[in-house]
Amino acid sequence: MSKTHVTTTVNGDEVEFLVEPRQSLLEVLRDELQLTGTKEGCNDGNCGACSVVFDGTLVASCCVLGVEAEGKEVETIEGMASPEGLHPLQQAFLEETGMQCGICTPGFLISSKELLKAKPNPSEEEIRFWLANNLCRCTGYDKIVKAVQKAAAVMEEA
Amino acid sequence: MNAPTTPPPVRTEFDVVGTTPIRQDGFEKVTGAARFGDDIHLPGMLHGKMLRSPHPHARIVSIDTSKAEALKGVRTVITGADMPTLSATVVAAGEGGEVNMQDIADNCIARDKVFYDGHVVAAVAADNPHIAEAACALIEVEYELLTPVLNVHDAVADGAPVLHEDYTPGAFLFPTQKALPNAGRLFMEHGDVDATFEQCDFVVEREFTTKAVHQGYIEPHVTTAVWTSEDTLTIHTSTQGAFAIRDFMASFMNMSLSKIKVVPLEIGGGFGGKDVVYIDSLAAVMAKRTGRPVKIFMSRSEVLRGTGPSPETYIKVKLGCNKEGQLLAADLYLLFEAGAYPGGPIAPGTMCALTRYNIPNVRLDGYDVFLNKPKMKPYRAPGATQANFAAESALVDLAEAAGIDPIDMRLTNALKPGDMMPMGFPCPPLGSIEMLNAIKNHPHYKAPLEGENRGRGVSYAFWFGAGLGSSAEIRCNSDGTINLTTGSADLSGTRTTLGMQAAEELGVDFALISTNVGDTDSVGYTFQSVGSRTTFATGIAVISACNKLIAEMKKRDGMEWVVEAADVDYAKGVFTLKSDPSKTQAFAEVCAKADHTGGPIIADASEFPEGVGFQIAANIVDVEVDVETGKVEILRFSALQDVGKAVHPDFVEGQMQGGSVQGIGWALNEEYFYDDKGTLRNPTLLDYRMPTSLDVPNIDCTILETPNPGHPYGIRGVGEVPIVPPPAAIRDAIKNAIGVSLTDLPMKPGNVLKAIWEQKGKA
């Protein structure tokens, strides 16, 4: 199958790759760009483990084609921390034990980051509604919700 | 299961245990750097895919792989005929009985017959997964269809189609006996059950059913096999037990254990479903044939069709008591799906259905039923959730019939320390009475609950847990830091809870200790992370290694002070000369001088602890039932658990909350839908719907600590029992809300509405 040349921006860096039309953005990130922090849990948009930000929109990267990334900006978990340190959400997930096995964690962090952009001070109900995009089988969600609340408070102060 | 022996006193004061440090693997997990099973890319690696049977029961007449092999980019195609002959088929599995390795090998890839929708019949390795998938579609399989057996009642009926001409009875925790063509049996009886029922003042008899549910780990099964020489194999995988994978692979590949190395990568959830081989042997054979590494990553539908589930069950319960509410007799008949091969969780389900109560006359009649569904797997306290739902529900109904408060009835009959257990030894220290009183005194239980169609329910649960063998190795570095390696897969933070125990025992700062999960070449044999055993049993191995390390370091001090090791004291990071306490050396100083005192300071230990101490838990739950739609909403949920000693209380709460939510999913909406042809109709996470954050409330946690004398710190297993009580508690709450008794899981709107109509009539 012939491949298409794509130029895109991932976490602020311009990258190029060759991609078959049938390859998803998730596959490109993981297998072509070696950005394996984005996880595959279901490959049909139901678990949220592959959540990334695609031109400002929270998406399941398994449901976006690699060729669609041409000229777009993609944000993944690998771009969340900065040289100055962890994002407040990452720090809060550590402090509040907002994870157990950790496979769903990148998706929850990306999703939570977009939540706090849209609603800097969300209620518990708003957090639970927003994060219903993402499945976690280990935690029962309580400590994830608390971590997001904590990060929101920290970011509010900053 | 052996009787516990008299243990040394349990420690009660702690510096590290009971604190909540940030986990050392946390940074990698919040930055995406952690390497899970699918995050490995080896040079020249091929990708494997499987072709799975669309039929639940069929004989394979022929398989034509020629078109698949001809596809560009396909490197090899295999069928069951290409798999090695096993070194041994039936092997002993400790006191559990015997395990038929051929069954487990055949479950990976069928040889003559397929036994369920999704059974693998062929596999392809190709340059990329898309080519492999396309090649699978080109494989032509001719099947001779056989009549499928799709429910437990059909399977045990006379004249049912027989799945296996002969079989090795299932053995999980306890062995079953050959009983029926499609079922093994576990039968236990003591006292005179039938005569006692005649004398009971109150008797209830109920039938309950539960549906198959999947463990639902978010990371699908994945493995990568690479031959590092002609006869040495390395498996990189995500598993609950690297050594178990090595054991299976040695049998399936007919190889020596020493020639196989299993490298555990981070595991994205297991819950009992990831401790056996499904795809590793297929990857290994295809890697051998191609001379290249082969990775296999299951799709979600493959995970749901081919791995996992915990069985659908039918349980008939008869319970009788006197006017005072004392339980006098119990009779349980349990049909648990084993799936395609023997060995489902019938034994632990049967054995712990009633263990938490003293009942003088008991008959337990459990069947491990073979039918055309996937081979059933343990799921967090395997078998206990189904059995607890039935037994607790019957108890609540009996209490109602007798006019006794259900918690009082539980208090009257609760198994207490010293009471003789069905296994033939007295109950070790267990906070059963404390737990039941804690429910009564809980602010949630005391709070008024108002509003129409609202009700509160309670349930109480017991689970055994496991001990089994673990190994640990501890090494001092010249700068005073410490590396700790164990063989236990870390599913949820156990590197931290093990490192905390090392810090406690060594009396040093937790930050000095780096804990890692060893591969099978780098540490001693360790059983899987199952049975809530890692923090408990591997913890004992860690403590044992620490004590050996301290003994070695005392020897090093003794050399310098020219005394025997016995003349040196050690406490909280400081060695002291007993005869002259002014002479001291810090832990780090001894580490720094190691080259002058005999070389690197290391210690290792292996332990096989018996005193698991058991796990008990309870729930209080408030629900509101929409009587028009049958939908049940959980308003408030409290989980109580006795953990012996909480090593990391936040992690303990996490286990309680996670297990509770899995139990809520099991209670209210998760289920496998098979059609009448035996096809699984909901193999996606859209249709197999697990609870989301919006479906559940906060799970309030109450941690009780009745020390377990089987661990130096009093620790009990934690991970499994939280999943057990929710279905019975929710059923009780629904009953108290609308006066309708449910008997079938899941208690989804349709089932609730049906029960309302049957018991109260249509509105």
Image: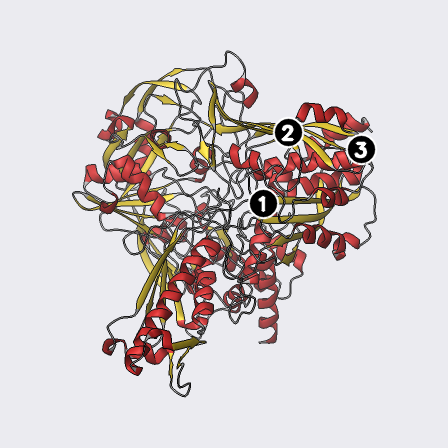
Rounded to the nearest whole Å, what is the CA distance between mark 2 and mark 3?
24 Å
Which secondary structure lies at badge 3?
A: helix
Rounded to the nearest whole Å, what is the CA distance between mark 2 and mark 1?
18 Å
Q: Residue at x 57, y 67 (%)?
A: A151
Q: Is residue B159 left or right of residue B443?
A: left
Residue B657, image x, y percentages: 60, 53
For badge 3, the amino acid type reads: Ala
**Subunit ID for the residue under disc 3:** B
For badge 1, the amino acid type reads: Pro
> Vertically, is B359 above or below B675?
below
Of pointers 1 and 3, the one earlier in the residue sequence: 3
Of pointers 2 and 3, the one earlier in the residue sequence: 2
Q: Is residue A10 left or right of residue B699?
A: left
Q: Quadrant of residue B413?
A: top right
Q: Is residue A54 visible?
A: no
Label 1 CA crowd tier, 10 Å (few <14, some 14–19, many 20+) = some
For disc 3, the marked residue is B401
> Vertically, is B525 above or below B598?
above
Q: Is residue B346 visible?
A: yes
Label 2 CA crowd tier, 10 Å (few <14, some 14–19, many 20+) = some
For disc 2, the marked residue is B191
Residue B205, image x, y percentages: 71, 27
